[in-house]
Image: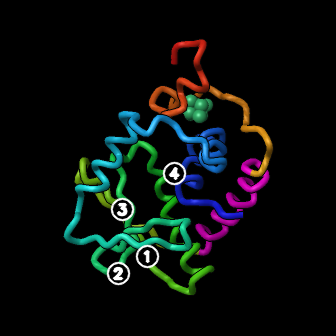
Amino acid sequence: MKITATVFYSFQICPREAWFYYHHISSDSDHEYLALGRLVHETSYQRYRKEIFVDQLLKIDLFRGELVAEVKKSSRHIEAARLQLAYYLYYLKHEKGLEFEGILLFPKERKTERVKLTPELESKIESLLNTMRPILAADKPPPVRRTKYCKSCSFRDFCWSDEET
Ligand code: SF4
């Protein structure tokens, strides 16, 4: 079962959203938040970053050749971002035999944070993967559950078509 970085990240915010991505159900690609995220990602730290694809699952940025980097438009979902980056490090270690440290980059906030794959973090990633697998493999998505993230979610019209978010 191949879990992409996008699915992994989304699951930390909303399992239903992750299920959509896992089953290749796209939201509106022109959604303002996604567009902003892409813009920040494409224009930040260009001199220092090199994009690398791994097994068609992960698209990682190698920052200054030594750190696996993840660029985010804001630190709003910082815990999900930490776990996503830890998932990159975990995958590279266990599937490729490559050990890296990571860095989160928040260019709009001029903020960075280093992430190290500690044994505790590795256990957490394994536990999360075990939780995610049956939910993602299910025939139906998890039920709609209103959270503070629904308002800025690209699936909001789909989930809440009859209501205001
Ligand atoms: S709108 Fe809310 S419930 Fe629906 S996928 Fe997005 S975050 Fe999840």
* Amino acid at circle 2: Glu
Report which residue position mark 3 lands on: 113
Q: Gap in Å between the C-alphas at discs 2 and 3?
A: 15 Å
User: Is 5 positioned to the left or the right of 113 in the image?
Assistant: right
Q: Which residues are magenta?
A: 119-136
Residue 32 in the image: state x and y as whole percent.
36, 34
- Confirm whether the magenta stretch covers residue 53: no
Say if residue 76 shows up in the picture.
yes
> Which residue is more in the foreground, 160 or 12?
160
Residue ID at (55%, 65%) = 57
* Amino acid at circle 4: Ala
Report which residue position mark 1 lands on: 101
Say if residue 117 shows up in the picture.
no
What mark, if any, has residue 66 been given in the picture? 2
Q: Secondary structure at mark 2?
A: loop
Residue ID at (62%, 70%) = 122
Asked whether disc 1 touches disc 3, contact meaning CB atoms under 8 Å apart, the reply is: no
Instruction: Name the N-terminal-most of marks 2 and 1.
Output: 2
Q: Gap in Å between the C-alphas at discs 2 and 4?
A: 22 Å
Residue 156 in the image: state x and y as whole percent.
53, 27
Residue ID at (23%, 53%) = 110
Report which residue position mark 4 lands on: 80
User: Is 35 positioned to the left or the right of 134 in the image?
Assistant: left
